[in-house]
Image: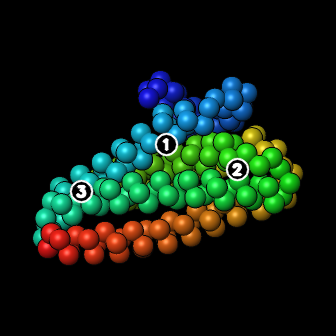
Amino acid sequence: MDFKFLADTVRNIILNTVKEWDSIYTENRPVSLFSKSLFFPLVTLASISTFLGAFLFTNTELTNIYSLIAGIRYFIVMTIVVYGTALALREIMRSFGYRNDSGTAFKIVSVSVVPLLLCQIVSQLFESFIFVNILAFFGLYILYTGIERMISPPESDRIKIILAVLLVFFLLFILTGRIIAQISDKFYFSIFA
């Protein structure tokens, strides 16, 4: 894991989005770097935050195992959502006639969820800070700019691609969240309750 890459990418994508996307495009770093040094560290921190928030503040009547399951559930849901959205973006790009590159699609999606994951680190730990999640909408600008810089579609296609990606992201988030919650709750209540 490259901590410098993590810190630099998070700082630059928030403070200077266009320049960071140009850097991502020109440097052509491997997708594994974005996965191992950007997405997984942030989703792991958000999962730990979910665990700690449930352990310290939320679960007063359930055992501590439920807090652990909540953290694992968050990790699984976000991983499925990001990878699923990246696969969908690849297919969306192909359907619009752009290069069918899963690496580019994953870079766009994983960098675009950085504000969401940063907000989740705070709001999953302290539920009273849920209002901070409004800052996650900055990810829409990051997504817009990433699609513009990495794929270079015309404006009309760009809006369609963004709307399709958002629809897939939210549908995956809702459906995966519900399914994983049902499975994990059945698991918990059948074994630990």
Element on which disc 1 rests: helix
* Horizontal arrangement in the rendering, residue 98 relative to residue 91 (left or right): right
Q: What is the spatial separation of the Cα atoms under label 1 and label 2, in whole angstroms?
A: 19 Å
For marks 1 and 3, the one nearer the N-term is: 1
Determine the residue positioned at 49% across, 71% down: 174
For marks 3 and 2, the one nearer the N-term is: 3
> Could you tell me the amino acid type at mark 1?
Phe
> Could you tell me the amino acid type at mark 2?
Tyr
Determine the residue positioned at 83% across, 58% down: 96
x and y, in percent, of residue 98 in the image: 83, 50
Q: For the residue carrying disc 3, how many other residues have a C-alpha within 10 Å: few (<14), some (14-19), or many (20+)?
A: some
Residue closest to the eye, 181 or 17:
181
Mark 3 lies on residue: 68
Of labels 1 and 2, the one closer to you: 1
Of labels 3 and 2, the one closer to you: 3
Residue closest to the eye, 130 or 34:
34
Mark 2 lies on residue: 144
x and y, in percent, of residue 170 in the image: 56, 66
**Dots 1 and 2: beta carbons under 8 Å?**
no
Query: Looking at the rendering, which quadrant does residue 183 occupy?
Result: bottom left
Mark 1 lies on residue: 39
For marks 1 and 2, the one nearer the N-term is: 1
Please determine whether, in this image, residue 118 is positioned above or below residue 92.
above
Query: Looking at the rendering, which quadrant does residue 58 occupy?
Result: bottom left
Q: For the residue carrying disc 2, how many other residues have a C-alpha within 10 Å: few (<14), some (14-19), or many (20+)?
A: some
Q: What is the spatial separation of the Cα atoms under label 3 and label 2, in whole angstroms?
A: 35 Å
User: The C terminus lies in which quarter of the figure?
Assistant: bottom left
> Could you tell me the amino acid type at mark 3?
Leu
Please determine whether, in this image, residue 64 is positioned above or below residue 32.
below
